[in-house]
Image (tube, helix red, strand yellow):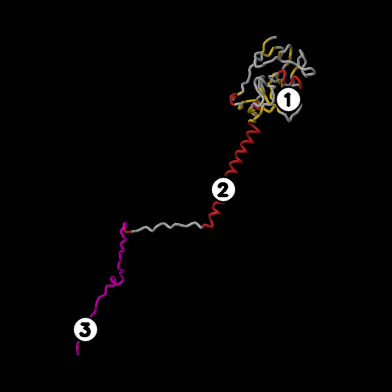
Amino acid sequence: MPTQNNSKVAVDSRIDRSTPNVVVSSAPKEDIVNPAPEVKQQNPTNLPVTLVKRLVNFCLDFLETIVVALSIFVVVYLFLVQPHEVKGSSMEPNFHDNDYILTDKISLKLHDPERGNVIIFKSPPNPDVDYIKRVIGLPGDKVKVQDGAVYINDKKLDEPYLADKTNLFPGSFLQEGVDFTVPQGEYFVMGDNRPHSSDSREFGPIKADSIIGKAMLRYWPITQFGIIPDLKYNLSSP
């Protein structure tokens, strides 16, 4: 009887449980071909909607700019400066009909008007009309007109900017050779064109709260463009 050889093979459990490692190498970079970018085609039906949105955004931006500009203008107009057009000849030869000036509305809120200032104020006969005149008498001053000249506190006012003498009209508020004392809080004003000006000689002094501001800049005609100077007077004895 043949002898059965039961061969035994030793099995290494470490070998059976081991998992082979497989290394997969990537393709060379030069072999990689990037795919072409995808181009999205705009739906023709969305084009009108896009245009409308752009138009609305433009209009909103434009309106916002207008609102901001108008707000700045209103603030400037109400509190800082105001344009005025000179009407008539009462301030000739220094201001003429259709001259355009800017009125400084803030400085006279910080300090009182001074003699020689050219101011704009509400007309006492008609507050809806603005007048432009020159400050001659301050509160407490004695004002007198005599022989074509103006006297302040018994001293003659030197006014080289006048083309004519200072006259008085029959029935005027101010009488020839009679002193008038300007009340507190009021100012005595006159136009530079004395024969053709309705001013404090006719209707009396104006109240401080009727003053709008001081003439600051003439911007038309362009040949006369410039800052309007304040005058300083030499009061001489009669």
Query: Contact, CB < 8 Å: mark 2 with mark 1?
Result: no
The span shown in magenta is 1-30
For label 2, the residue is: 57
On whether residue 99 falls in the magenta region, the answer is no
Mark sitting earlier along the chain (2/3): 3
Residue at image coords 58%, 24%: 223
Q: Residue furthest left?
A: 2
Residue at image coords 20%, 87%: 3
For label 1, the residue is: 207
Query: Where is residue 233 drawn, in percent x and y?
Result: 65, 15
Q: Amino acid at mark 3?
A: Asn
Query: Where is residue 115 drawn, in percent x and y?
Result: 67, 19
Q: Quadrant of residue 102?
A: top right
For label 3, the residue is: 5
Please tell me how crowded label 1 is: few (under 14), some (14-19), or many (20+) other residues with Cα within 10 Å. some
Residue at image coords 65%, 32%: 79
Using the image, determine if residue 166 lies above or below residue 30.
Answer: above
Whole-angstrom CA distance, mark 2 to mark 1, is: 52 Å
Mark sitting earlier along the chain (2/1): 2
